[in-house]
Image (tube, helix red, strand yellow):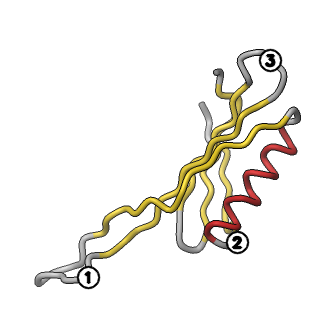
Amino acid sequence: MKVVKSFDIETANAHFQLTISEMPDGKGYVGKYYGTTPQFQQAVSPGAPIPMMKNVGFGKLTHKEIGALISACREEIEKRNGKIEKITESKE
């Protein structure tokens, strides 16, 4: 599938990657998103804590219209991890 749009999406606690691709038959689009959040170690030896990434979910939606698909993916991301604070369209 050919990626037609890609976005970096930030909520207060997580970062998501959203890619929009054309369906192989050309009759719609597929949106896939994946989110991670920084997770700090519980027990820390002397020095600064070491950030680790924690998976906060992934999803896949389809729709015939690209605008409606992007909106639906944004809604799902907000349900998973709160209000979206920043969206940046990636340049491929």
- The one nearer the camera, 59 or 45, is 59
Percent x, y for residue 84? Answer: 69, 66
Mark 2 element type? loop
Say which residue appears at 59% left-offset and 30% top-offset: 92
Q: Residue tagged by mark 2?
A: 83
Q: In 3D space, how far apart are the residues under numbered discs 1 and 2 (Cα atoms)?
A: 27 Å
Name which of mark 1 and mark 2 comes first in the sequence: 1
Say which residue appears at 64% left-offset and 39% top-offset: 19
Looking at the image, do the residues carrying marks 2 and 3 touch, with CB atoms under 8 Å apart? no
Mark 3 element type? loop
Q: In 3D space, how far apart are the residues under numbered discs 3 and 1 (Cα atoms)?
A: 48 Å
Say which residue appears at 83% left-offset and 37% top-offset: 63
Please tell me how many numbered marks the rendered image carries.
3
Q: Nearer the viewer, mark 1 or mark 2?
A: 1
Looking at the image, do the residues carrying marks 3 and 1 touch, with CB atoms under 8 Å apart? no
Q: Residue tagged by mark 1?
A: 42
Instruction: Give the amino acid at mark 1.
Output: Gln
Circle 1 residues within 10 Å: few <14, some 14–19, many ≥20: few
Q: Residue tagged by mark 3?
A: 26
Name which of mark 3 and mark 1 comes first in the sequence: 3
Name which of mark 2 and mark 3 comes first in the sequence: 3
Circle 3 residues within 10 Å: few <14, some 14–19, many ≥20: few
Circle 2 residues within 10 Å: few <14, some 14–19, many ≥20: some
Residue 29 falls left or right of residue 49: right
Percent x, y for residue 60? Answer: 66, 43
Percent x, y for residue 68? Answer: 87, 45
Q: Give the vertical position of 34 relative to 19 (above or below).
A: below
Say which residue appears at 31% left-offset and 65% top-offset: 52
Instruction: Give the amino acid at mark 3.
Output: Gly
